[in-house]
Amino acid sequence: MEITRRQLLKYSAALAAASAIGLELPLPKNIGAVHVEKWVKAVCRYCGAGCGVYVGVDKGRVVAVQGDKDNWNKGFLCVKGYYLPPILYAADRAKYPMLKKGDKFVRISWKEAMDIMTEKFADSINKHGVHSVAFYGSGQAYTEESYFMNKLFKGGLGTNNIDGNPRLCMASAAVGYVSTFGKDEPMGAYDDIYHSDCFFIIGSNMAECHPVIFRLINERKQKNRDVKIIMVDPRKTLSARIADLHMSFVPGTDLAILHAMAHVIIKEGLYSKDYVNNHVVFKTIKDDKPAKVSFEEYVKFLEEYTPEMAEKISGCPKEDIIKAARWFAQSKATMSFWTMGLNQRTRGVWANNLVHNLHLLTGQINRPGATPFSLTGQPNACGGIRDTGLLSHLLPYGRLVANEKDREEMERFWGVPKGRIHPKPGPTAVDIFRAFNKGEIKCLWIACTNPGQSLPNAGPYRKGMESKDTFLVVSEAYHPTRTSELADLVLPAALWVEKDGTYGQSERRYQYLEKAVEPPAEARPDLDVMIEFAHKLFAKLGRAEEAKKLFNFRNSEDVWNEIRHASEGTAYDFMGMTRARLKKAHGIQWPCPTEDHPGTVRRYTAKYGDVLVKRFDPDAKDVSFYGAKADGNKATIWLRPYKGPAEPADTEYPFVLTTGRQIEHWHTGTMTLKVPELKRSAPDAYVEINPKDAQKLGIKSRDKVKLTSRRGSIVLEARVVDVPREGLVFVPMHYPDKLINLLTTDAYDALSKQPEFKICAVKVEKV
Amino acid sequence: MKRLIILFLILALPVIVIAKEKGHIKTAEDQECYECHGTQMQVWQDGKHGLMNVKCVVCHGSTDKNFVAKTDIYRCRGCHGEQVSDVEKKLPLKLRNCFLCHDAHSVTPKFHTKGGK
């Protein structure tokens, strides 16, 4: 039926007339507005996309959520964001401090909890030194919370025994950015999607993991059919539905594909000589140290990486590699996206470098639509952990523990004695738990994360966490989780809009979340607990007066104001982001050095608005990688040799296991699995098997299948689908009663220390 | 002809709008929507909501007490707040139904689907 707008208006008028003449039109019973007293501006609690939301509050309860149309997401949400309110009212919300006595948890008061906790930590420090205590933080904590704990541990106690779960998800991206461009974080923004003509998406199932960003790409494609989308993934995921080219490959062999693309680009003269000459240096590793090489040496290095060679290693057809290389180089503007498929690898940093190489080689960078963009898994992994420096090798805002000048700068800023910050980077995520297993770390505080489920090769670490010889504190909004069940002390935490604070998402956009409702029962904001802990601990250590000066914060705004000053003069400079501005704005992107500065959409280019180019590199005409001063403000193309995964499939374990997300759930499911609608939609774990493999093994959908790796085994229901390539099986990571991380490997990248969750060898048997 | 169409719409309106709230039949926990609703799911999958993975649960809730047979406009507010507010302001309560104009599963406009203006 085809009807013009004019006719439609007439019909609408008729409908209205029907109503006006009193025609009774019974309506569905469920129609009716949810009554909302006020809408409070916030950000979605889940992934690193950082969708703006408004939270509807009625009678002190969150009753609705709607997307913020004035934010980058234009009002759109994914299914998880849509169902945010129920996460606050789950039956298993942690409401009271709980102490483990024998095998049971008993309720205690906050005073008792803080006394016990500070006594244990102080006792350990007095007997075994400051390196006997540790903190494991989260990319879901607010920036103020993470900054505070970083200051307490590194500036107050003088230990770098502090790391966060972003080590598990984006450390390789961070080290990739730093090693190529001199400073961490993407230079581009979601706005680039509107200007891009070619999307190179590798190791990312955006349709399920970052659906609202995927929506923007789809919209771009719908409006401009010439836009090309290249999807590089061993699974034909839902994201591949909009791809013009899907490149499947043997997991772990993508380094060969990326080199082969560079090979084609050079061989066919598709690289940008001007860009390379003006903005790029080339480096390799010689005698364990970075060494500069020439462009000609890079060309020679690439000679062996022919498309034929890459096809032989990866199984990806050479024709596809050539096509992808041409599209990448020849489009008006190419934008890359990647996530865990590149990051959770023993060669994760190298894989990141190789994507950057392609952008630098072709000059597909530093202009609208052309940029390499790492997607983030958690809502505040960028703003709260990477930027704030809550990783064992970092100090706030691009400073490094191993750099004496940076240490001195932070010591002066924090007003602590010279030499307080320990010069050696501390243990990273996996190594913190290894040290806890060995008893080298006696007291560990975990906040806002669930390593009992999310650590790779979780079995041994779970045993360590449960040990009676050490003391484990878990701050959580839910209890029990697969981590809090192992704790000695559980502290009930306020969740999401039950407290206020700042989140920083993937495109350097910092956003303030206003408190909308009270937390349940005795749950408290983590920041309040952290401040109280710091004062009580220092009092027990005989340093009460020092604590008064160091931790003189009344609320999150006080902490935020110190944070802004910590960024002043750095490449992150966001002095202009006052709390008052953030309350009004729909996020602001750093750098934002002054209160009248609108924020920076694109970094490293003066032409497109980065005012810091002039500050750090006054002679630059436009592009300057001012974080890479030692290289003349140039970026680096790295010569990284091909290397496969730590544990490829073999005759004994002939399949590769990879893990990941479903759209309905997020991380360890502590939140999304409490939402009845999401739970009903995706109720249980399963294993995806390629139909050809299933046929060989006599497996049908819904059969019980046992997966066994060198570390553990699990029985799951089979889903025979043409999604994973032959030889690959996929299991979602969300389900607490099906701990797939009992099977994954804790082998990690030598540079980023990020574990290779994405690839381990398993055998598959029908049960 | 136009009068006939208007008359038809007036008479058909109760049929269009009337919908009884129905519970969902009991399902096994792992039963998937497509097993019984394959046709609707195909339409959904080929439409905008399908491409963007706006899954069944967004509009229909769970299959337990949270099940919603016919979606009201307030369910659309999560992503289409502005449009819902517009409908709220401009249409009487009885006509506040997104699916008078949009197909329920493909979500394409019912009328000018071939580029009408």
Image (cartoon, rainbow, N blue to C red):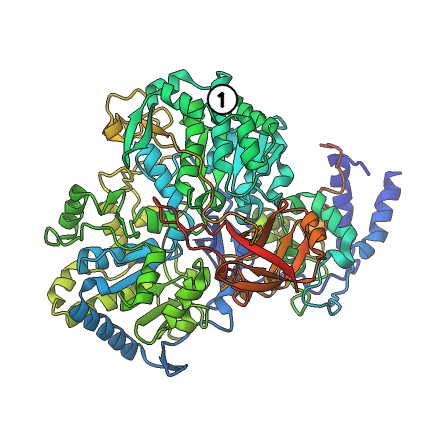
Query: Nearest the camera: A641 or A623?
Result: A641
Give the residue pinned by disc 1.
A265
- Measured along the vertical axis of the image, is residue A606 above or below residue B16? above
Query: Nearest the camera: A250 or B105?
Result: A250
Locate residue A187: give its quadrant. Answer: top left
Does residue B14 appear to the left or right of A679 in the view shown?
Answer: right
Locate residue A6: give its quadrant. Answer: top right
Q: Position of residue A274 (x, y in %)?
A: 38, 16
- Measured along the vertical axis of the image, is residue A305 above or below residue B47? above
Does residue A99 appear to the left or right of B87 in the view shown?
Answer: left
Residue lying at 71% horizontally and 65% vertically, measured from the top left: A29
Q: Residues within 10 Å of mark 1 (few under 14, many from 20)?
A: many
Q: Quadrant of the N terminus of chain A?
A: top right
Q: Position of residue A605 (x, y in %)?
A: 35, 27
Which amino acid is tagged 1? Ile
Chain for numbered disc 1: A
